[in-house]
Image (tube, rainbow, N blue to C red):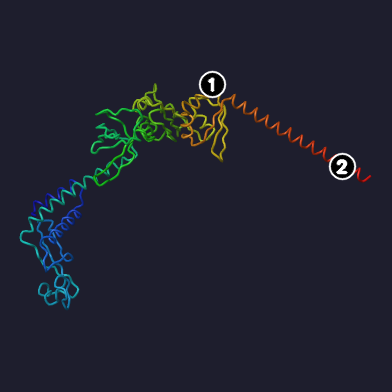
Amino acid sequence: MNQEFVGALKELVKEKGICEDLLFTTIQDAMVAAYKKNYANANTNAQNVKVNIDRETGEIHVYAQKTVVDEVYDDVTEISLEEAKEINPNSEVDDIINLEVTPKNFGRVAAQLAKQVVTQRIKEAERNIIYDEYKEKEFDIITGTILRKDKGMVFVNLGKLEGVIGPNEQIPNEEYKFNEKLKLYIVEVKNGSKGPQIHVSRTHPGLVKRLFELEVPEIFEGVVEIKSISREAGSRSKIAVHSNDEEVDPMGACVGPKGVRVQSIVNELKNEKIDIIKWNKDPVEFIANSLSPAKVLSVVVDEESKSAKVVVDDNQLSLAIGKEGQNVRLAAKLTNWKIDIKSKSQKEAQDEEDERILNTEVEIENEQTTDLEEVEVDIKASTEEIEE
């Protein structure tokens, strides 16, 4: 190893962001291992070898370290005080003396080892840099280019790395064409044995949220806030929004002029329907809004069970429930309330039935009371007859 080689190492340290101390320490450790394997003899062993590299000249020195003692019992690890003073007159018992044992041809071996260590460290440093870069983007949106589909997995080019869209993260019936660009949500970034691994999604509700942040400046700036999202990917999403500025309409901001903002998101999600709902701290209002586009007549909530009974016009029932129950299901996820929907006629019929049952119970109770009174009269009459 020479001065030019050391200079090249330092340049790599700056360029790749590798810790210089760690790099040189690792090279020295590798040289110690090489010496023990190829050159160790009766005067050295695995415990007392040390390698020093001069970081300016690149010179390498191998030392056998021995402890100064009054009486030597182990020639490999100990040296007498008398011998130590010949090397260093100031030596004392328990000091460590370095005896140079550098082999003549060790420089060639050391250079080869240094090259291997540096190559490995560069790879590790690059992996860590890329990992840190993508780790910062976790739970954010990224643009990827479709590379291939294999065994149900879709592989995408994310720039410096490949991402994977798992089967559960793919929108049902969405086609993934080679070289097509898609917006993706980064679900997880892991640093595996083969380098950083990135899992991305097209189904995560976070994708809808990030798309709105990109398209709606008011959301990005914090004027309009996304309170909650419920989604059935590829079919329909509901998003509840609230404005922190009374002069800004949250729904209008999300829709945009002539619907251009929301339409851009719909196009990105391959025509997935999006209902923009006005959030309200009053659960009655929020639940009524969440069932849009259906119009709600009344909402009765039970705070303890966090359930709500909703009444709509007869012609709004199917709209409120939605195809296969999708609308009410998404509304329940959006509000985090259990929702039971009835039409007006169903509610009236239920009320009539409840009233009939109540009246029947009252009649039975009255009859039981009358019968009891008659029994009491009979008992009284019988008692009087006995007394006479």
Say which mark, if any, is on residue 315: 1
Instruction: Look at 52% across and 29% down and name the residue there.
Output: 288
Q: Residue furthest left?
A: 104
Relative height, residue 41 to residue 127 (above, below): below
Camera-side residue: 375 or 64? 375
Camera-side residue: 123 or 384? 384
Relative height, residue 19 to residue 162 (above, below): below
**What amino acid is labelled 2 in the image?**
Lys
**What amino acid is labelled 1 in the image?**
Asn
Residue density around tag 1, few if under 14, some if 14–19, many if 20 or more, within 10 Å: few
Residue 331, position as x, y percentages in the image: 48, 31
Residue density around tag 2, few if under 14, some if 14–19, many if 20 or more, within 10 Å: few
Instruction: Look at 17% across and 58% down and name the residue there.
Output: 29
| Location of residue 62 by image quarter | bottom left
**Mark nearer the N terminus (2 vs 1):** 1
Q: Residue furthest right?
A: 388
Look at the numbered disc 1 and give the secondary structure of its residue: helix
Residue 337 as seen in the image, left or right of residue 68: right
In the picture of the structure, the residue carrying the numbered disc 2 is 380
Q: Quadrant of the N terminus?
A: bottom left
Q: Nearer the viewer, mark 2 or mark 1?
A: 2
- The number of numbered badges drawn on the structure is 2
